[in-house]
Image (cartoon, helix red, strand yellow):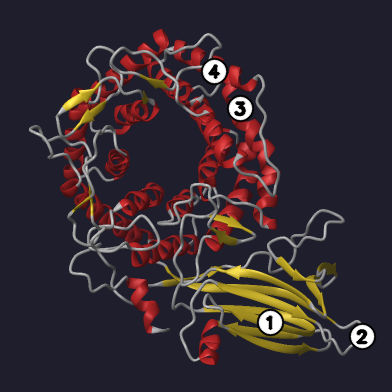
Amino acid sequence: MPTTFWMLLALATTLPQGPPTPQPGGPTAQVSVLCNGAFDETAPGGDQRLPWWRVIAGTPRIETDVAGSALVTAAGEIVQQPLPAMAGGELVIRGRLHGVGTLTLIDGLGGSASETWDGPGDEGFEFEVRASDLASGLMRAVEPRFVLQLAGGDPLVPGGQARWSELSARATFPCPTEDDLRSEILGLLEWSFDEHLSRSLDDLGPRPTAFVAREFDVDTGEPVGAPMGRVTFHPLYGQLLRAWAVEPRAEWGAALERFVRDFLELGLHPETGLPRYWDPVADVPLDDAGMEIRVHMDFLLDVAEHGPEDLRADCLAAATRIGEHVLRAGVLPDGSVAARYVPGDGRPTGGTVAIRRLDVPSVLARLGGILGDERYRDVAREAVLELSYDHYWPGTWDRIDPGFDDNYGHYGERALVMWEAWPDEPAFRQLALSGLDHYAPLWRDALRFGGNIAADQVRCWRIAAGIAELEPDRAELVRGLLAAAADVHLTGQQTNGGPWIDVTVVNFDPQRLPVGDTAGVPQNLLEGLGLVYSDELGRRTEADRAAFTGVVRQTLASFGGPHGLIGTTRRAAAETGNPARGSLRLHPGLLAMLEQLD
């Protein structure tokens, strides 16, 4: 195995500080990275598309006989499929060929090697191709992502064609045991949390607080840019709470307690109870700045349900106070509920996008479920019925987004929260199921035919997984969709050279579209791979654990520094600074897997 692979496998680094690193030479697993290599998945009758393969030339087709299914390529016909792999790792392609055909393997730098074979007789010809063979031919190291290309048959033989069958491709990924992966994740979280808690908190004014108030450089640890002019709840503390709930370390609990106490005192208006901003330099509240309130209520309820025992009652009381204010002032005449409020006088205010319509109803339903208070359920139900009156789910298989990732990703997720809180309420169930039932066939085709696959479709994975728990009749459908989605995101979000990034996938390739992609740390991919690692979804396997581990380690190698991860694909000049924004995007994936391993 090439030395570079073992170096990446262990993240061996010469940095003076940085994340904890496993020892070189750890265990590996073979990950299947080719889809539909048996050619047993076909398009509907009369449809010439080839699931999971892109046609470059001609009209190749899948034929099935008593011997099984095969891809038939005549002379001049070409198909391709991208293959993810670890940088420096092995990739092995095997298959069977009848007739004359040419296999070409292309690496991430555009180098290629081709083999032409003649598979005579009934048995045909069994072949094996390795990425290391390509490296020998190119006289340099090869780099992922790879592209497998098949062409055939013999232009000198009239009617000659190639029949490809029994194809497989397996890539070597690092594969620690579950216990070792858990320890690795906890080590990374400990390192990253320590960096944030020691470098990003508010020490700007006369009163230091636990609010996150500054960014710091991944290489030097020094502050980057101006301090934040206003602060409030920060995702760091939601992530810290999730980690504490699995691994209740004293230092994490103490950090949570300090923030919660500061938030309850300074981050909530004393009269209205609504969330507000805090000026960390002047140490004064900003009571006239409107604010959306869902994330604050959700955090308070998360602490009330899963946080340190001595914080739970106070957080539930604070969330209830906000909920009571919304019941008094936030329910609008049409049945919808305002998402944004001015904390000083408590009035609802505009300035939110349409997909926020169920944000507050969802958290009200959750609060009502905890309290057993049907008033909150009733308000949430009216908001859902108001939305459902003229709502439709937009999109086609080749243009599934933004209807799928944004509309269903928000409305569906909020509906799922309400349904989980009130399992017998049909309005919540109907909204969640209507979106899944509408998008399932479109999603399936988008995945297998190369449609538009946004990175943040992973929020829809969460919805689907939640529905599978509440509605067992949909579980088999969900398992198939999430398996296909995991394959597409793993393949399509890898870029040349090896890094995976948070980016839209079109025709199985990463595309930098102007749709808000961060193109940095693959938060959504890692969160998705962690989410599907479960027995219920059929993905708690060595291969799935290896894929997750490989993406994590490659991400650290590509974006990491001594004090954190950068948030984009390139480092800025040292004098500009490189904020550790990527660390916050790494945490959700680590936490998703940690929760599955618990």
Q: Amino acid at mark 4?
A: Ala
* Quadrant position of residue 303: top left
- Judging by the rendered image, the residue that carries numbered circle 2 is 158
Q: Could you say where residue 146 lies in the image, as x and y percent from the top left?
A: 56, 74
Whole-angstrom CA distance, mark 2 to mark 3, is 57 Å
Residue reaching furthest left? 206
Q: Residues within 10 Å of mark 3 (few under 14, many from 20)?
A: many
Q: Could you say where residue 487 lies in the image, as x and y percent from the top left?
A: 57, 59
* Quadrant position of residue 156: bottom right
- Judging by the rendered image, the residue that carries numbered circle 4 is 383
Of circles 2 and 3, the one toward us is: 2
- Judging by the rendered image, the residue that carries numbered circle 1 is 103
Mark 2 touching mark 3, by CB under 8 A?
Answer: no
Whole-angstrom CA distance, mark 4 to mark 1, is 57 Å
- Judging by the rendered image, the residue that carries numbered circle 3 is 431
Whole-angstrom CA distance, mark 2 to mark 4, is 67 Å
Q: Earlier in the sequence, mark 3 or mark 4?
A: 4
Q: Which residue sits at x=35%, y=60%?
A: 181
